Image: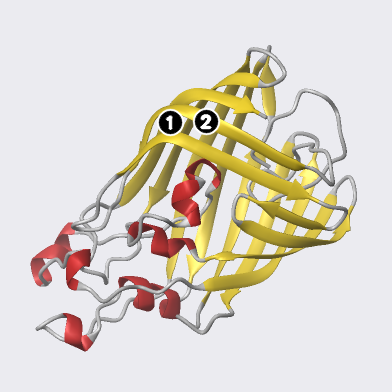
C-alpha cells in the first residue's frame, strides 16, 4: 500500500506495499507535491514531469482498489496473503499520457525493455509516432505474499483477458520495511518475465509500420529496483523521496528504444487527507 498512516489499524495488503496498515471500508486519499520525472526510453517519446501525484485506495473486507489495481483477497493471515488482481497493462504508459501507471507513478512496480547499440546499427530506429496506436489491455491473475517480520516476498502472474496482445507476465519481488529513527525506508528489488506475445505487440513492428518488414520480439527477463523514503512531520504530512530504476536491455530485438533503462525520480511533500 502506498499510504503511510501513523496509527495502527487493520492490515490489508496491496501489490505494491503488501504489509502497510490501512483502515477498511474507508476511502484513503493522499497528494504528493514536488519535483520529479519519469523518463521514457522509447525513441520519440516524451519524459513525464511529476509535480502533483495522487494516491487513491479503498479496502473492504475482501475487495480492494489501490492506485488503479482492483483485487479480491482470497485468504489472509499474518504471514500469507493470496489475492486475485486485475489492472491495465502498464506497457501502454510509454505510448499515452493518461495511463494509470502515469497517474500513479510512485506505486508502479512494472518494467519494460529496450534495444542495444548493436541492434541500432543493424536496423533503423523507429519513433513511436510512426506506429499504430497500441491499445489498452486489461490483465488479471493471482498474487501471493509471504511476510516475515519487515521482509515481504511476493510473486504474481497476470494474463491478458481483453484479447489485445494474448500474452502474459509474471514477477518476483523482495521488499523490506525499515525505520531509522523517524525515517521510514522501503527498498524493493524484483524481476519481471514477459512473454513474446506481450513484447511483440507493444515493442514489435507490424509489416505496414516499416519498410523493412515485420519485427517480432522474444520473451524477456527484466529486473528493477526501487527505494521509497518518508520523513513524517505529523500524522498527515511527510517529506517523500522516491527513486526507481527499470532495466530494458533484454528487448534487444526491438528497434523502438532509445535508452536501455527508464528512471522515476521524485522529491516532495505528501499530504494524507
Quadrant where the N terminus sits is top right
Near-viewer residue (18 or 171): 18
How busy is the neighbourhood of tag 2: few (under 14 within 10 Å), some, or many (20 plus)? many
Q: CA distance from mark 1 to mark 2?
A: 9 Å
Q: Quadrant of residue 253?
A: bottom left
Q: Quadrant of residue 11?
A: top right
Q: Are marks 1 and 2 in contact (CB under 8 Å)?
A: yes
- For the point 51% across and 40% down, the residue is 106
Near-viewer residue (159 or 87): 87
Which color scheme does this rendered protein use? Answer: secondary structure
- For the point 14% across and 80% down, the residue is 210
Quadrant where the C terminus sits is top right
**252 over 240 or under it: above or below:** below
How busy is the neighbourhood of tag 1: few (under 14 within 10 Å), some, or many (20 plus)? many
Residue 26: mark: none
Q: Position of residue 83 (x, y in %)?
A: 77, 62
Badge 1 or badge 2: first in the primary sequence: 2
SS at mark 1 in the image: strand
Q: Is residue 115 toward the left or the right of residue 118 in the image?
A: right
- For the point 40% across and 58% down, the residue is 93
Q: Is residue 84 toward the left or the right of residue 241 in the image?
A: right
- Tally of numbered discs: 2
| Mark 1 or 2, closer to the camera | 2
Q: Is residue 121 toward the left or the right of residue 89 in the image?
A: left
Q: Quadrant of residue 197?
A: bottom left
Near-viewer residue (120 or 203): 203
Residue highlighted by disc 2: 32
Residue highlighted by disc 1: 266
SS at mark 2 in the image: strand
Amino acid at each position: 500500500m502506498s499510504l503511510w498512516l501513523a496509527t495502527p489499524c487493520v492490515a490489508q495488503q496491496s501489490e505494491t506495499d503488501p504489509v502497510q496498515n490501512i483502515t477498511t471500508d474507508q476511502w484513503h486519499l493522499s497528494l504528493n507535491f514536488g519535483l520529479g520525472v519519469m523518463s521514457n526510453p522509447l525513441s520519440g517519446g516524451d519524459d513525464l514531469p511529476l509535480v502533483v501525484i495522487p494516491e487513491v485506495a479503498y479496502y473492504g473486507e475482501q475487495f480492494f482498489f489501490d492506485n488503479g489495481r482492483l483485487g479480491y483477497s482470497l485468504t489472509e493471515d499474518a504471514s500469507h496473503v493470496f489475492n486475485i488482481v486485475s489492472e491495465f497493462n502498464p506497457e501502454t504508459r510509454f505510448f499515452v499520457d493518461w495511463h494509470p501507471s502515469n497517474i500513479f507513478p510512485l506505486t508502479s512496480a512494472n518494467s519494460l525493455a529496450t534495444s542495444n547499440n548493436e541492434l541500432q546499427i543493424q536496423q533503423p530506429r523507429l519513433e513511436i509516432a510512426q506506429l499504430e496506436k497500441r491499445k489498452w489491455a486489461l490483465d488479471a491473475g493471482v498474487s501471493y505474499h509471504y511476510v516475515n517480520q519487515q521482509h515481504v516476498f511476493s510473486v504474481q502472474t497476470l494474463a491478458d483477458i481483453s484479447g489485445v496482445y494474448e500474452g502474459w507476465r509474471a514477477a518476483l519481488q523482495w521488499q523490506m520495511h525499515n525505520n531509522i529513527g523517524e525515517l521510514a525506508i522501503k527498498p524493493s528489488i524484483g524481476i519481471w518475465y514477459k512473454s513474446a506475445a506481450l513484447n511483440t505487440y507493444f515493442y514489435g513492428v507490424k509489416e505496414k509500420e516499416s519498410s523493412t518488414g515485420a519485427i517480432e520480439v522474444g520473451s524477456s527477463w527484466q529486473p528493477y529496483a526501487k527505494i521509497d523514503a518518508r520523513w513524517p512531520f505529523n500524522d498527515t504530512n511527510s517529506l517523500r523521496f522516491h527513486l526507481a530504476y527499470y532495466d530494458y536491455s533484454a528487448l534487444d530485438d526491438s528497434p523502438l528504444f532509445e535508452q536501455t533503462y527508464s528512471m522515476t525520480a521524485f522529491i516532495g511533500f505528501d499530504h494524507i487527507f
